[in-house]
């Protein structure tokens, strides 16, 4: 009765609910809780060329209405992903998207070329906005020309769908979205975590080993929603919204503000079934409001 599907170019998604990279591993971690294939897509854990140990502990801290993380893109690298993870997840009946990261522009290009060869991976999410790694990451996402350069280089090296993940830690996120669009991105996703910190007053030291980290959870939703609204009005490519989406109501707010799809992150730590509950809630809302197609509510408040 309700069509929840959407497309990024000619890449079709069965519904607008995706997992956020770094919050559900590679997908199988959720198998005991949900049928992963019901989701529109899975954004797998951030992947780099080489294995990374990540930052020293402690690297997570709870904050009011949110959490700080400074994991630092811990992963076993693209070789391990190709040999051990890809064979396990390629059978999922949903879109598997790899979030790629690098310390240098050349890292991104090499990684994009590697992923391009994987038949069952139809898209990458270019992460130029991670706030808790010392090299690369946010350095590309907070300088306009760097964002342009890395997006262009990856676009020229990668033949499938390119999603660019934007940093909120900038003065004007719309400028970065427009640059991504100009350089050939098929979609933009936003927002990545906000840069924050916490202090352990008993230990009289920072709560994170890196002092600062990425803030996620309900605390950032109003900021994320505002940025998605701004970007959706400015670009012609699909916008994937994220940031503090805990319930179906939260997700619907993002869609009404202009997001074509949403990513669920921190909510999955609290409830591994959150993404499915949000999907069901979106469908119920559309039935209640007598909408038959997702496109009818995307950006509704701007009409």
Image (tube, grey):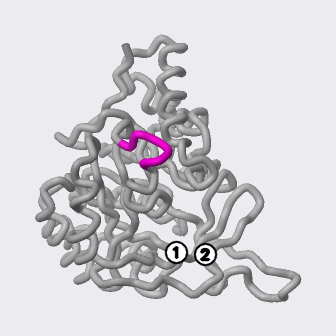
Q: Nearer the viewer, residue 296 or 30?
A: 30
Q: What is the chief secondary structure element of the magenta stretch?
A: loop
Q: Residue at x 57, y 76 (%)?
A: 70
Residue indicated by mark 1: 131
- Which quarter of the figure has residue 28? bottom left
Seen in the image, is 226 located left or right of residue 43?
right
Q: Quick one: label 2, few (<14), some, or many (20+) residues within 10 Å?
A: many
Q: Nearer the viewer, residue 164 or 288?
A: 288
Q: Residue at x 16, y 71 (%)?
A: 114
Q: Is residue 273 above or below residue 141?
A: above
Q: Name the spot of residue 248 as percent of width and height, x first.
A: 57, 34
Pick the residue in front: 221 or 45: 45
- Label for residue 213? 2
Of the two numbered discs 1 and 2 on the same chain, state the one appearing first in sequence.
Answer: 1
Mark 1 crowd level (few <14, some 14–19, many ≥20, 10 Å Cα): many
Quadrant of image for the N terminus: top left
Mark 1–mark 2 CB contact (< 8 Å): yes
Magenta span: 31-36
Residue 32 in the magenta stretch? The answer is: yes
């Amino acid at each position: 009765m309700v069509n929840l599907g959407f497309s990024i170019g000619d890449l079709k998604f069965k519904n607008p609910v995706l997992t956020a990279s770094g919050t559900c591993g590679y997908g199988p971690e959720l198998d005991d809780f949900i049928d992963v294939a019901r989701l529109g897509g899975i954004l797998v854990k951030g992947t780099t060329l080489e294995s990374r140990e990540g930052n020293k502990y402690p690297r997570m801290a709870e904050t009011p209405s949110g959490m700080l993380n400074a994991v630092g893109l811990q992963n076993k690298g693209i070789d391990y992903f190709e040999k051990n993870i890809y064979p396990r997840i390629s059978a999922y009946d949903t879109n598997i998207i790899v979030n790629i990261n690098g310390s240098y522009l050349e890292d991104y290009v090499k990684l994009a070329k590697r992923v391009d060869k994987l038949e069952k991976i139809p898209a990458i999410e270019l992460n130029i906005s991670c706030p808790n790694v010392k090299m690369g990451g946010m350095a590309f996402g907070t300088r306009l020309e760097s964002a342009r350069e890395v997006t262009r280089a990856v676009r020229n090296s990668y033949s499938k769908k390119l999603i660019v993940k934007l940093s909120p830690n900038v003065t004007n996120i719309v400028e970065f979205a427009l640059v991504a669009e100009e350089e050939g991105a098929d979609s933009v996703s936003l927002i990545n975590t906000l840069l924050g910190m916490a202090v352990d007053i008993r230990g009289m030291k920072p709560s994170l080993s890196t002092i600062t980290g990425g803030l996620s959870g309900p605390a950032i939703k109003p900021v994320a929603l505002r940025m998605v609204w701004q970007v959706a009005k400015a670009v012609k490519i699909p916008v994937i919204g994220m940031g503090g989406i805990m319930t179906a109501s939260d997700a619907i707010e993002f869609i009404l503000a202009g997001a074509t799809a949403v990513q669920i992150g921190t909510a999955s730590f609290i409830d591994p079934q959150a993404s499915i509950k949000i999907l069901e809630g979106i469908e119920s809302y559309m039935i209640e409001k007598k909408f038959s197609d997702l496109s009818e509510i995307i950006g509704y408040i701007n009409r």
